[in-house]
Image (tube, rainbow, N blue to C red):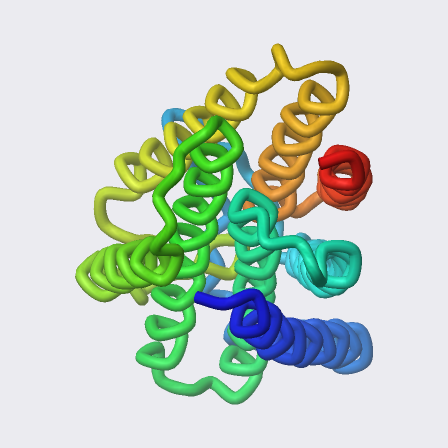
């Protein structure tokens, strides 16, 4: 995969990411103007993650959409920022990290669930959106893991093969996972089968990515800052994906945006001297 091809892939992703952000803004306006749909009665008031669960209310829908907007704009601006600064840099760790940031925009599809609820469309459409979002979660996690392995010194040069494997595995998981469309979580996702297992896999993949980046910190303070940046991005993604409260959205947005900026700045300094 040439540098030009990679840049074109990222540009296509940026266009789609910006479109999803615009959709999130539109949905937020829809909820603000027209209020909640009667279909909101299908919302569950309990959110789950691993062994934890917490209660929320239907009013959390507004903050969920705000969080979607924050996630989408962070993804769009972050990808543009990373592509701009590393336009002529072929480093695979930066490329896969940028794909990870880009994949966050798929979570913005949760705003489409609001539209489906207002129109009272069949739950089949929400099922498809839930699967697409989980595809983005797995694909992004695999890209982050690939980025960390390349940063740690892996020399495998067939980047297209890595992308294909990550995409196929993510698609298979998203396609095969059973979706329960009888109710919807406050974070605008339908419950899925083996939910705890899926959350555990995503968590372990993130932890492995952070640990892999930490193995590079002997290279100096710049690489330690990069490891911190990756940690901030992972934490920010989790807060914005699962929680629907103002403190979580503010903390998640700052963590995500700060992590992306720190990663880009420190990596730019690192490659400037290479």
Residue at 46 percent across and 29 percent down: it is 153
* Left or right placement of residue 182 versus residue 231 in this view: left
Percent x, y of residue 184: 43, 60
Splitting the image into 4 quarters, where does residue 201 fall? top left
**In the picture, residue 216 is in which quadrant?**
top right
Instruction: Tell me residue 114's x, y (percent).
Output: 58, 74
Residue at x-position 66% and y-position 72%: 14
Give the residue drawn at x 71%, y 65%: 76
Closer to the camera in the image, 73 or 150 = 150
Q: Quadrant of the N terminus?
A: bottom left
Kindly identify the residue that appears in the image at 30 percent across and 35 percent down: 196
From this view, report whether residue 31 is shown above or below residue 102.
below
Does residue 255 show up? Answer: no
The answer to which image quadrant residue 233 occupies is top right
- The spot of residue 257 in percent (x, y) is 78, 45
Front-most of residues 66 and 264: 264
Q: Quadrant of the C terminus?
A: top right
Give residue 80's position: percent from left, percent from top: 75, 64
The correct choice, above or below, for 48 with respect to 43 in the image is above
């Amino acid at each position: 995969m040439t540098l030009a091809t990679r840049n074109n892939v990222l540009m296509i992703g940026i266009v789609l990411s910006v479109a999803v952000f615009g959709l999130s803004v539109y949905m937020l306006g829809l909820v603000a103007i027209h209020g909640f749909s009667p279909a909101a009665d299908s919302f569950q008031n309990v959110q789950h993650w691993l062994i934890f669960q917490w209660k929320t209310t239907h009013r959390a829908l507004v903050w969920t959409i705000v969080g979607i907007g924050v996630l989408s704009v962070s993804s769009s601006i972050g990808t543009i920022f990373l592509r701009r600064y590393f336009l002529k840099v072929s480093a695979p760790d930066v490329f896969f990290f940028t794909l990870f940031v880009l994949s966050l925009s798929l979570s913005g599809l949760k705003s489409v669930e609001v539209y489906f609820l207002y129109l009272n469309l069949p739950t089949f459409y929400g099922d498809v959106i839930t699967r697409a979002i989980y595809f983005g979660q797995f694909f992004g996690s695999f890209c982050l893991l690939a980025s960390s392995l390349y940063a740690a010194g892996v020399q495998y040069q067939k980047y297209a093969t890595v992308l294909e494997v990550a995409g196929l595995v993510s698609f298979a998981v998203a396609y095969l996972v059973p979706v329960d469309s009888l109710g919807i979580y406050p974070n605008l996702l339908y419950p899925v089968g083996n939910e705890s297992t899926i959350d555990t896999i995503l968590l372990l993949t993130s932890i492995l990515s952070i640990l892999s980046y930490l193995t590079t910190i002997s290279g100096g303070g710049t690489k330690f800052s990069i490891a911190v940046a990756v940690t901030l991005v992972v934490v920010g993604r989790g807060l914005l994906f699962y929680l629907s409260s103002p403190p979580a959205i503010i903390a998640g947005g700052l963590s995500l945006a700060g992590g992306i900026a720190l990663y880009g700045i420190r990596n730019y300094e690192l490659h400037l001297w290479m």
